[in-house]
Amino acid sequence: KKKKKKKKDPAVQLTERNLKLRKRAKTRNSRDRRDAATKVRYRFEPDPRLAKPPRFSGSMEAVKIGPQKKTGVYVAAVVYRVRKDKLTDRTKTIIYSHGNATDVGAMHYISSVLARSCNVNVVMYDYSGYGASGGIPLEANTYRDIKMVYKYTLEQVADGDESNIVVYGQSVGSGPSCYIASKRKNVGGLILHSPFMSGMRVLTPSRALACLDIFPNIDRIKKVDCPVMVIHGQLDEEVDVAHGVALHNAVKPDLRRECWWVPDRGHNDITDGPGKMSEYVRRLKAYLSQLE
């Protein structure tokens, strides 16, 4: 009989995982530094197995943004730019912080839809440790990432006009999005898609473990000084719609914009189907049109 493999202690597993992540981060950081030194250019090639998005007449550019001063990390991003003849002084740029189990490649469809249908630039990026980005996935690193991406977007895409930047956070992306929106007083707007009040509140409403909490969105949203739109599925079993409602209610009254509580959708399927996608685009366009 084959001997059963002894199950590793959870602490050992965690240690091994952390060592693996650190080794991968070191390799990627070294590669990205070499690429930057030799001025390597990147090309974005969508996965042919994924749904083909509607044709976008603008340009797509794959970039590495960095290095981050403290960690030396470069983050991977794809920048969708509106065609020059369609640009106006009110053209918005969306910085999209995606959900947990995805990357810029898998988000190509929605990026293309937003750029094409809403006539906006889109900067879709991966957090440290995700996709082709270097570094390690930590809460603190997501804040460093979005600060770096925001600076790049302001200087390289939005022509220095913060009022034309709209921060979009989906699920875990609501964390860095609320963070940067609470820090940048001149940002144009904030969209929260299936957001949570805080990481610990997803698990329990008790505040006994508040000292261990991450992404305190419910506290930061009160400091945001731009118009806020919240989108949340009423059938969401991962993050209850009550989180979206609480965040909407915590926004300063004059900055609350029409929310969308989607009656027959959950956490990851809000835009599934042509009908829902059309309504999603219509509601986003209405929100964007109200921004200065």
Image (cartoon, grey):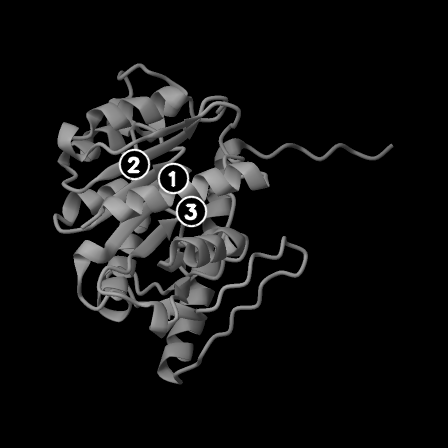
> Which is more toward the observer, 55 or 247?
55
Question: Which percent across, then down, holds residue 65?
Answer: 34, 67
In the current view of this chain or complex, which residue is farthest to the right?
1
Image coordinates for residue 188, horizontal then vertical, percent: 20, 50
Q: Secondary structure at mark 2?
A: strand
Q: Are marks 2 and 1 in contact (CB under 8 Å)?
A: yes
Residue 34 shown left or right of residue 212 in the figure? right
Judging depth in this view, the residue of 26 and 162 nearest the camera is 162
Q: Considering only vertical position in the picture, is 273 above or below 84?
A: above
Estimate the spatial distance between the alpha carbons at disc 3 and disc 2, rounded to whole Å: 16 Å
Amino acid, disc 3: His
Query: Observer-nearest residue: 200 or 42?
Result: 42
Of labels 3 and 2, the one closer to you: 2
User: Which numbered dot is residue 161?
Assistant: none
Residue pointed to by mark 1: 283
Residue that mark 2 sits on: 229
Q: Are marks 3 and 1 in contact (CB under 8 Å)?
A: no
Residues tagged 3 and 2 counted as in contact (Cβ below 8 A): no
**Residue situated furthest bottom in the rendering:** 38
* Residue 181 on image: x %, y %: 21, 45
Please tell me whether residue 110 is drawn above or below residue 161 in the rendered image. above
Q: Distance between the Cα atoms at labels 3 and 1?
A: 19 Å
- Asked whether residue 69 is in view, the answer is no
Amino acid residing under circle 1: Arg
The answer to which image quadrant residue 68 occupies is: bottom left
- Of the image marks 3 and 2, the number of the one nearer the N terminus: 3
Residue 89, position in %: x, y?
Answer: 22, 64
Where is mark 3, residue-wise?
Answer: 98
* Dot 2 amino acid type: Met
